[in-house]
Image: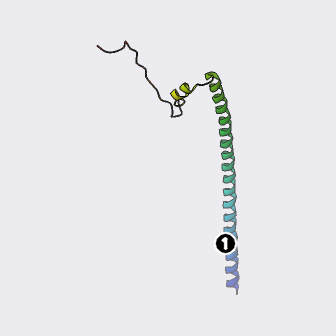
Amino acid sequence: MSQADEDTTFFERERDRLARDVTTGFEELLSSTNVLNRKLEEVLGMTKEYDTIAELWQSFYQLMRGPLTDEDQSETMGLPGTGGHVVAMKQSKGSGTR
């Protein structure tokens, strides 16, 4: 019966050790998840700040342009840097090659 007692104590010691390892792993996972959550909140906060700044510059741009006519709107395909801007080159009448 002393062999059974030794096995039980070894089993209990091993079980307790593994339970501590699992607990430690979960604590580390929780800590890492909290750090990740804080970083994501920082990034989302920064993008909201950029949206506010972008809206401010957009309103400033529209204010500086003044009211647009239908003809002006058809000429403007988009703003530079947004992918919708088309660069049109105008040729002068006297700049041909001879």
Rendered residue at 66%/53% (across/down): 32
Q: Name the kind of residue labelled 1 in the image.
A: Glu
From this view, report whether residue 49 is shown above or below residue 94.
below
Residue named by callout 1: 14
In the picture, which quadrant includes the C terminus? top left
SS at badge 1: helix
Foreground residue, 36 or 58? Answer: 58
Horizontally, is 36 left or right of 71 in the view?
A: right
Residue 95, percent from left and from top: 36, 14
Rendered residue at 40%/18% (across/down): 91
Horizontally, is 68 left or right of 38 in the view?
A: left
Foreground residue, 39 or 29? Answer: 39
Residue 16's image quarter?
bottom right
From this view, report whether residue 75 is shown above or below residue 38.
above
Residue 74, percent from left and from top: 52, 29
In the picture, which quadrant includes the N terminus? bottom right
Foreground residue, 30 or 85? Answer: 85
Residue 40, percent from left and from top: 66, 46
Rendered residue at 68%/39% (across/down): 48
Residue 83, percent from left and from top: 51, 34
How many residues crowd mark 1 within 10 Å: few (<14), some (14–19), many (20+)?
A: few
